[in-house]
Amino acid sequence: MIRATINSLFERCINYKSSRFMMAWLLVGFFLMNNDAKGQDLKLWYNEPAKAWVEALPLGNSRLGAMVYGIPQREELQLNEETIWGGGPYRNDNPNALQALPEAQKLVFEGRTKEADKLVNQNFFTKMHGMPFQTAGSVILKFPGHETNSAYYRELDIDRAVALTRYNVDGVTYTRETFSSFVDNVIIMRITASKKGAVNFDLSYTKPAPFKVSAKNNVLVMEGKGASHEGIDAKIIYQMHSAVKTNDGKVSFTDSTLSVYGATVATLYISIGTNFIDYKTVGADYEKKAAAWLSAAMTKDYASAIKNHAAFYAKQFNRFKLDLGKNVEASKLPTTQRIINYRTTQDPSLVTLLAQFGRYLLISSSQPGGQAANLQGIWCNAMYPPWDSKYTININAEMNYWPAEVTNLSENHQPFIQMVKELSQSGRETAQVMYGADGWTAHHNTDIWRVTGPIDFAAAGMWPTGGAWVSQHLWEHYLYTGDKKYLADVYPAMKGSADFFLSALVKHPANGWMVVSPSVSPEQGPLSAGTTMDNQLVFDILTRTAEANKILGGDAAYRAKLLNMVKKLPPMQIGKHTQLQEWLEDKDDPKNEHRHVSHLYGLYPGDQVSPYTHPKLFEAARNSLVYRGDKATGWSIGWKVNLWARLLDGNHAYTIVNNMLTLAGGNNGDGRTYPNMFTAHPPFQIDGNFGLTAGVAEMILQSHDGAVHLLPAIPDIWKDGSVSGIVARGGFEISMTWKKGEVTEISVVSKLGGNLRLRAYNGLKAANLKPAKGANPNTFFTKPAIADPSVSDQASFKGAGLKTVYEYDLATKAGGRYVIFKK
Ligand code: FUC
């Protein structure tokens, strides 16, 4: 609102050339600058341009990504379109697997793992490792004479999804405002000068691969392709169209450039169209798509374009608000400095900013109807990025969607759910051809072409449980929304994954359990059978499919078959180091600090380890996590924050949060947050951002263990705070305030009705709030039974050591709002 007024003021002041207006504008500008410099909580800001890609600022409308460098004399917008990938529709199943399978299983059961590895490497893999996600190229804007400038400032306002660059040259203020419009499907940059006619620049394209440029009807067109890769021909073709609107000055073209001379305000529009249709089909008219988006966008006036964009974004972003306290002095500094200082300042609003930045990135990379956010979301400046920037589904791609439901971005989960539905189709052939099995399967990686065969090599890629993990998201979305029509729609994918395990599990000769074999505990070979993560994932897909079947009134005989198989799965086991065993055999090494903590899937994101009903498993899970240590790669930190939150240890979770807030880049291999707040494996992977956001939410609210647990793992340092719009399973949208670590006021909107069981560390009061009795009757909180195994050494069992909890029941009606207070 304030900004809109300022913009129109500015326009008026140019139109009327009134020096009075100019004075007024300058004053407002100064006020704003000052305000910016104080470091508002929802801004990333800097007093120098980006020197590297991880300093540039990301914008995205889910389909189009832009990294804005903000360099005065040579602006770069590095661009991505979500469907520009290498190769084209292909498959990667090796049919030799089927005949090698019984022998591979036998070798694994006999412990002859080297031979098993060799056999599997020869028969299960192809020469393909997946296709890369690729840059669309960059738009370069050269501003002659802007090398020498002053009063430099740039920001990313995650409250509006707009980037801004501002500086002075020879007494003229230049401003660039950029966004990737959610409404108009193009990228828009408005360049203004405070002096009439002072905007001059030349626009050209660049890309680390061949491309063609031409000028046509006042549009500069780049045509490019995805790369051919590992024997798969390039099938993606795209065009990028750039055009400029000005009120004054001149726009001219050569074959390869667009130039603006003597304008006061120039608005640049960039549109990209590709020929991608779906994972099996290309052939769309990319030129027509790019041209149509561009011309439609250019008919709108700038003020309403930016207003509509920000309003679309705000509808999603504003649903969740967080306040963890503020260190006023610390938060006044530019973002990079705040990250550097974090260790000593304990600047809590920087944690809030990082958590909200994760939501910003999810909104900007994952809108319904689009592609799921990949390893770098939609931001990638290379033709061959690390791990091809594809989807690693033994943790990374799932982590991208952990914050979706709990931080009130349920519809942003849709692209991932769509990907699972597509994998459930392409994975049928893999199940059949490689395993002779029913249903569908996927291994540890996929790409835009939805390949489902194994990639890389046995110790990492021989993991046929990827389909089971991605399918858990189908169920989670239901637990938050209660949408039965949706459940019926995704049920075939859940059932297909369950069917795969019904037919592909094999009997372990040593103990008779039904196990996945050959497999690995992700990325820790050698080949194995019945790893703990596999057992947990299979348990979840079988029991959740059975539950979905029941809710949808499905076939009872099939349900019985699923539950019968559940009884034959290996239980979780506690080993000689009091750890939760990662493997069937008690062979964990307490010195193993591997980044994957796969056997703790059952603790998070799974819900199989409860401190209240499985104290021994809970303690064993904690011991395992202590052995793994606190240091980790970015995504592993993201996971560990969630795990410590589930272990109800807020102070430990906070230690892990702090490990993320260390400056990455340059030579600092230990840093985990780049200046632009992308998180570092290193290198940049977006999963760490999403894992961190989910982890902070998990410290504030949990809803997987029979109740809605308020402030389950709040660290001492966040003793006063508030949240609004955090979401619990069962469709409860919660706002609350806490003081001195105690929850003081809660407001709940019950979307689906039903019993609300609240769990807190302090007493609560409200009309009709009753002490909890018996099992929670709300079916969204019902869980299948899991036995707490006995511990061989009873003396070493300490018990969970939990804080006392207060539990209450409140009967709610769909659409009702309820207010509860501290007793
Ligand atoms: C898994 C991880 C790696 C990396 C890659 C993209 O393979 O083990 O650390 O994050 O995914």
Image (cartoon, helix red, strand yellow):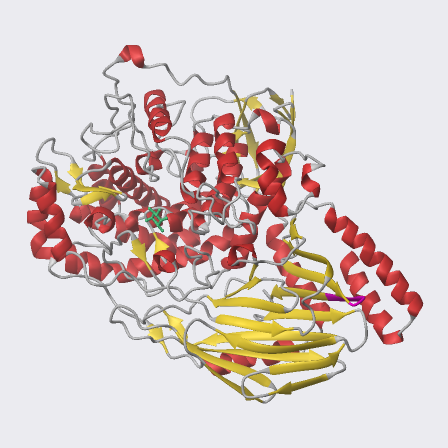
What is the magenta range? Answer: 170-174
Name the image quarter holding residue 156.
bottom right
At x 20%, y 63%, the residue is 127
Q: Is residue 190 left or right of residue 404?
A: right
Query: Can you name the residue that lies furthest to the front here?
Result: 148
Rendered-image quadrant of the C terminus: top right
- Chief SS of the magenta region: strand
- Residue furthest toward the right? 20
Residue, x 42% and y 64% (percent of image)? 382
The residue at the point 77 percent across, 49 percent down is 35
Q: Position of residue 592 (x, y in %)?
A: 29, 32
Query: Residue 510: x, y in percent?
Result: 9, 32
Residue 107 falls inside the magenta stretch: no
| Image quadrant where residue 416 sits | bottom left
In this rendering, would 27 be left or right of 244? right
Rendering coords of residue 370 (x, y %): 46, 63
Rendered position, 763 above or below 783: above
Q: Is residue 95 above or below residue 696?
A: below
Q: Nearer the viewer, residue 61 or 750?
A: 61
Magenta stretch encompasses residue 172: yes
Classify the position of the N terminus by image quarter.
bottom right
Front-most of 475 and 739?
739
Left of 97 or right of it: where is 348? right
Residue 134 percent across, percent down from the top left = 41, 66
